[in-house]
Amino acid sequence: MNILPMDGRARLLGDDVNTDYIISSRRKADSIDPAVLREHLLEDLDPEFAASVRPGDILVAGDNFGCGSAMEVAVTVVLGAGIRAVVARSFSRTYLRNAMNNGLLPVIADTSGVREGDALTLALDAGGRLLLDNHRDAPMECAPIAPFMLEVLDRGGLVPYLRAHGGFQVRP
Amino acid sequence: MVAQTLSEKILSRAAGRPVRAGELAICTPDLAMGTDGSIPMALNYLESMRSGAAPRSPGRMVFALDHYGAASGPKAQALQARARDYAARHGIRVYDEGEGIGHQLILESGAARPGLLMVGADSHSTSYGAAGAFGTGIGSSDLAGVLLCGQVWLKVPETLRVVLTGRLRGAASAKDVALLLARRLGADGAAYRALEFTGPGVAGLDMDDRIVLSNMSVELGAKAGIFPADAVTEAWLRERTGARLDPVSSDPGAGCAGAVDLDLDAVVPQMALPHRVDQVVDADAAPFRKVDLVYLGTCTGGRVKDYREALEVLEQGGIAPGVRVVVTPASATVRAELEQSGMLGALAALGAEIRPPGCGACCGTCGGIPEDGATVVSTANRNFKGRMGNATASIYLASARTCAAAAVRGWIGRQA
């Protein structure tokens, strides 16, 4: 199953959304089950947010998304809410890693042209370029994702990838 | 032969082929560590990858049970027991609860050495860069991958050089340099990049100083913060290990993404204000505030040198009424050294509370949570809202000397 192309509704967030905002530490103390935690997704930024999420929504953020702690649950809670991709101008490197490893598509792109609720399409063009289309402006070219990472994402993350292969398929 | 940066050299060796900045590489780490905070989730991932999987290279793994303690409750202790049990069954080295912080213990053991690739399921794994290793933080799923197959995927980072000149003077310390870098570059100023500390100023920094700078590199978003090995590194490692040392350094002319010049002569005490590590001012210019708790510890500021410097200041005037001073040595070795030198006794006699070695109150997992509305001045590395377990506390970050001065006065900043 290929993660791309992907369609979804844009849900706009700001800069420096840290992992504690994504899921508060006080919630993690009770449970790390994504099905439970999803009800508290981003609650410190917007208490109504979690209830308004629809499966297939795409988070669209500014700079430094996922900064702060490297807690992997900040990725699994997003997946638990049915969100399959985050598009941001930049990510903290630990969030980017954890997203890749858990099958949440992290896309680096200029998100300034995206509005709340836009119907978005993420797709590879014939030349293999990753494009973000808001169906209003010309499609925006995103930072490329290495073929190896796309394979991991297509598999659904590092667990299914390593379960299938037993190790990394070394390829430059 | 194309000129390579220090990071490119280390990752090329670990990948078994020449790699360049920007490339994705499958690497074999020389050492991988996890903590009681990250191992349980890693064991869940591992179970899903292959049920009952034994570690591929147990000799290259270290488990450090440093985030939780007796005060953390039965749930946390059950997580520790699970990590301990897996390690015992598979011959993985464990640093148990009370021995200290994993990063400090690994450094003390001489396991962090020039040219090694060291990954840790804890963000402050950048600390190993002080000894010339490429140390970087990974997630629990990555740790599970290393357990399963001994490898991890890494993107080879570009290098940002930090060129140090001069030497630290007066009350200035390595912590002030780290905070000044956060002030100048911002919390994501080195994102995805490796910091490489170079220049004539490096020789004047001892290993404790270097550990602080490598440790805090992650607060600038850096993937690693590396010092090239020199005579200081070698002398320090010779006291700790008989292992062969194989120093690597950047080739002349190796490409880098940029350079930052920093004159150590000009550094004055700095302070990070709540709730951002890059919201930094000269310590003298901080807004006036009464202090409730002074915290001396963590993988950033819990070494013998920190306590020596703190004690020099504390002995000038004692601890002000109404201020609690908590001492949490980074390791049992640090604690023993403090005890033998009389410093621990002196700290206790002044009224400081001495806690068992470990991560302690830094991330709110091990007791000692600040009171509601408390003002905390700490030698730690992070001051996010809620970091120490109470979102109403305000955490200020500074050097051991500046923290001690706050304890003596009972306040920080500029009196109106």
Image (cartoon, helix red, strand yellow):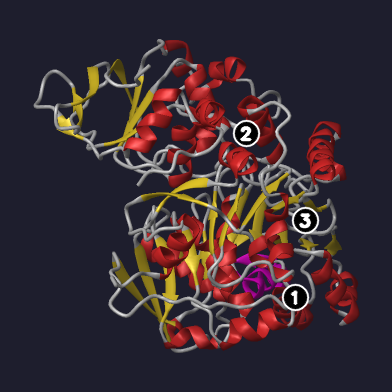
Task: Tell whether label 2 touches label 1 (CB within 8 Å).
Answer: no
Q: Which residue is mark 3?
A: B358
Residue B228: x, y in percent?
49, 77
Name the residue type under label 2: Ser
Question: For the residue labelled by badge 3, is the local secondary structure a helix, a strand or a loop?
Answer: loop
Asked whether the residues under marks 1 and 3 belong to the same chain, the reply is yes
Magenta stretch encompasses residue B26: no
Q: Is residue B164 left or right of residue B254?
A: right
Residue farthest to the left? A138
Q: Chain of mark 3?
A: B
Name the residue type under label 1: Val
CA separation in Å, label 1 and label 2: 32 Å
The vertical placement of A116 against B327, above or below, is above
Q: Chain of mark 1?
A: B
Q: Chain of mark 2?
A: A
Magenta stretch encompasses residue B400: yes
Q: Which residue is mark 2?
A: A25
Question: For the residue labelled by badge 1, is the local secondary structure a helix, a strand or a loop?
Answer: helix
- Say which of marks 3 and 2 sits in front: 3
The image quarter containing residue B45 is: top right
Residue B304: which disc? 1
Residue at 63% x, 59% y: name it: B380
Say few, some or many: other residues with alpha carbon within 10 Å of mark 3 (under 14 / 14 to 19 / 20 or more). many
Please report the bounds of the magenta region as a residue range.
B399-416
Q: Is residue B228 left or right of residue B410?
A: left
Residue at 62% x, 83% y: name it: B234
Residue B215: x, y in percent?
57, 63
Q: Quick one: quadrant of the N terminus of chain B?
A: bottom left
Residue B201: x, y in percent?
46, 86
Name the residue type under label 3: Gly
A116 or B161, which is in the foreground?
B161
